[in-house]
Image (cartoon, rainbow, N blue to C red):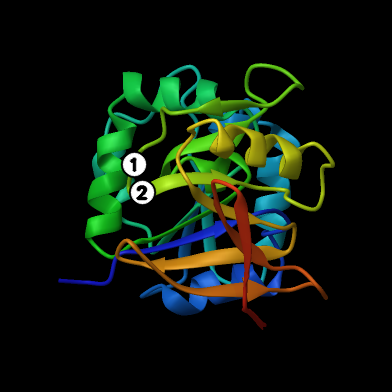
Amino acid sequence: MPDRQIIACGGFLLGSRVHDHVLALARGSRALYVPTASMENANLVLAFYESMRGRGEADHLVFNPYPPADLREFLLSFDAIFVAGGNTANMLAVWRVHGFDELLREAWESGIVLAGTSAGMICWFEAGVTDSFGLQLEGMRDGLGFLAGSACPHYDGEERRRPRYHALVDDGFPSGYAADDGAALHFVGTELQEVLSVRDGATAYRVEPGAETPLEARTL
C-alpha cells in the first residue's frame, strides 16, 4: 500500500521550500490546485501557476458552474493536490455536494500527496478553528476526518488565534495541532512524522486542555 501523506501548513505554502518538499514527496510533478475556499479567486490560481514554474506541470479545479464530468479520473491523474485558503465551511459544503470529499480520500489512499494552507490545513482534520462564520473565530467539527483531532493555522500570524484555540480546547473542543505561518505538519498515514519550517522561529504545537507543547521543527 502506498504511503498516505498530508502536509498541513499554517501559512505561506506556495513557492516556499515546503512547496518543494511536497513535490519531492510525490511520485511525480503533476500538481493540482483546488481554490474552492477562495471562491476560485483567479489571482490565486494565477499565483499557483507562477509558483509551479520550473517545478512541474500545473492545473486547477473549479466547481463553478460545475466540475468536470470525469472528476474522478481527472483528480487521480495528479501526484500532489494543493488546497487553497479561504472559507473552510463553504468549501466543504461544495465538495460534499459533488462527492469530492470521498474522491480526496481515494486520492490520499492511492498515494497522492495532499497539501494546503489555512482552510487547506484545517480540512483534513475532524475539527478546526475557522473564520468561516465571522471574524470572531469559531470551532468547527465538520472536517474531512482523515486526521484525528483539531487544527489551527496562522498561530503566530493572527493575534486572536492562540487564545481562541486554547479557550475552545479548554471548553471541550478536540485537542490537536497549531501551526505558525511558515510551519507545516507532515503526516504519514495518520501519524505526525515531523514539523517543517521555512521561517526563523516558526514551528507547530500540540494543544491540549491547559497545555501547549512546542514541537521541534526541521528547517528546510
Please determine whether, in this image, residue 150 is positioned above or below residue 56. above
Question: From this viewpoint, which residue is outermost toward the left?
Answer: 1
Residue depicted at x 73% and y 48%: 154
Front in this rendered view, residue 37 or 198: 198
Please determine whether, in this image, residue 85 is positioned above or below residue 156. above
What residue type is disc 1 on?
A: Gly
* Residues at marks 1 and 2, CA–CA distance in whole angstroms: 6 Å
- Residue at mark 1: 145
Instruction: Measuring from the top left, give residue 17's x and y in whole percent.
Output: 68, 75
- For residue 9, side relative to residue 122 (left or right): right
Q: Quadrant of the C terminus?
A: bottom right
- For residue 117, side relative to residue 90 (left or right): right
Q: Are marks 1 and 2 in contact (CB under 8 Å)?
A: yes
Residue 148's label in the rendered image is 2
SS assignment at label 2? strand
Front in this rendered view, residue 23 or 195: 195
What residue type is disc 2 on?
A: Ala
- For residue 1, side relative to residue 30 (left or right): left
- For residue 73, side relative to residue 132 (left or right): left
Front in this rendered view, residue 202 or 13: 202
How busy is the neighbourhood of tag 2: few (under 14 within 10 Å), some, or many (20 plus)? some
Q: Is residue 35 visible?
A: no
Residue depicted at x 27% and y 71%: 3
Instruction: Measuring from the top left, give residue 15's x and y in whole percent.
Output: 71, 65
Instruction: Measuring from the top left, give residue 181's x and y in whole percent.
Output: 75, 57
Q: Quadrant of the N terminus?
A: bottom left
Q: Is residue 78 visible?
A: yes
